[in-house]
Amino acid sequence: MREPALVPRLRPFTSTVFAEMTALAVRHDAVNLGQGFPDTDGPAGMLETAKNSLFGGDNQYPPGPGRPELRAAISRHRQRYGASYDPDTEILVTAGATEAIAASLIALTEAGDEVLVVEPYYDSYAAAVAMAGAQRRVIGLVETENGQLELDLDALRDAITPKTRAMLLNSPHNPTGTVFSRAQLEEVARLCVEHDLIAVTDEVYEHLVFDGAEHLPLASFPGMRERTVAISSAGKTFNCTGWKIGWICSTPELVAAVKAAKQFITFVSGGPLQPAVAYALDNELEWVENLRASLQEKRDRLSAGLADAGFAVRPSAGTYFVTADVRPLGFADAAELAWTLPERAGVAAVPVKVFTDHPDEWKHLLRFAFCKRNEVIDEAVERLRKLV
């Protein structure tokens, strides 16, 4: 009998948990707090600019690196961190951050290389490492006495070997909502410099931090500008996750390398949407600040509701997500609860253990998205009270 068509390294990635949970939510008419997308649109000026582009003749291939006005806007936006990137040679527009991550790993790592990944990890990371033919080595987050999560720096030091080529870092961190501290990032930077590692940083939630937390780009630390591929996107910042407009900022050499891979994946994408994202980066950051404040309130709203429903809620300093321990409700495994939750209570959530290589260490946590209208959050909480 013929072997399965899919090569072995990609067989674990035939489906995503988000698709499966969304299908369950639809089947049972459940409130979907599993997948991280907002249920309201972005700023009106951005949408108007997109409409004008769509009906103004901007519907053909944009330039391979991205439209010049968008690359210039990205460069100006990055200056908020004290960084200067040449829009012509140091910025590349991609089909969202997911493509940017995959293209970076395909271009910069190969068979025999190891890529350090923080666990729990966003699900595309493992697939992207596999597509590159590299091997992932995970470094777990550890819980402090007050319930905060932070990077296990001792494990990070121990994980680096002569085969280690790159580190993939996500802060603010999905799925846990952790925002890494300056001290932690200083040590990550020192280790990257000491061991000559490339850092690929996923910063898509850069604006969505709470309670006075600060997003600190790894590229801003000593020795990191020349070895960091900084990735972000418009989707989470401007409530347009379906547009898939992302970008990388790095050195001319690293950008050229990633472009060599990216141009044979999508070549280009989102031509008429790119001017709208450029407009938003230049003109809608006040709207983004209002979004950030709103999301902080929604986090508090959902966290209080989950606690009232009997969950032990973990702190979240950023992103769209809060995690909650199911054990106080009498459940040992959050995944077992998650697969029945849409039918049992009419709510969909995602078990954190599906984002890990060590599921037993994370099996008690569910991830809930709070990037929804208040009435949706309230309805979900009301339904979850049935579990008590």
Image (cartoon, grey):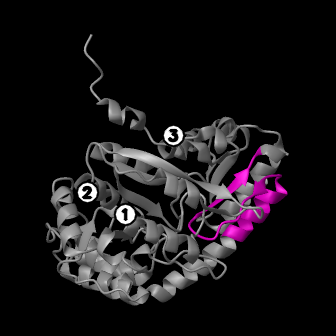
Question: Is residue 205 in view from this perspective?
Answer: yes
Count residues near mark 3 (Cα–Cα under 10 Å), then give few for <14, some for 14-19, many for 20+.
Answer: few
User: How many marks are shown on the rendered structure?
Assistant: 3
Count residues near mark 2 (Cα–Cα under 10 Å), then give few for <14, some for 14-19, many for 20+.
Answer: some
Instruction: Give 151 or 51, whichever is nearer the viewer.
Output: 151
Instruction: Look at mark 1 in the image and give the residue it sits on.
Output: 200
- Asked whether residue 341 is drawn in magenta, I would say no
Query: On the picture, is 66 further left or further right than 16?
Result: left
**Magenta region, residue range:** 299-326
Contact, mark 1 vs mark 3 (Cβ under 8 Å): no
Identify the residue at image location x=36%, y=58%: 166
Between marks 2 and 3, how big is the CA–CA gap?
32 Å
Report the mark closest to the observer, 1 or 3.
1
- Asked which secondary structure carries label 3, the reply is helix
At label 1, which amino acid type do we have?
Val
Between marks 1 and 2, how big is the CA–CA gap?
10 Å
Q: Residue furthest top?
A: 1
Report the mark closest to the observer, 2 or 3.
2
Instruction: Look at mark 3 in the image and give the residue it sits on.
Output: 20
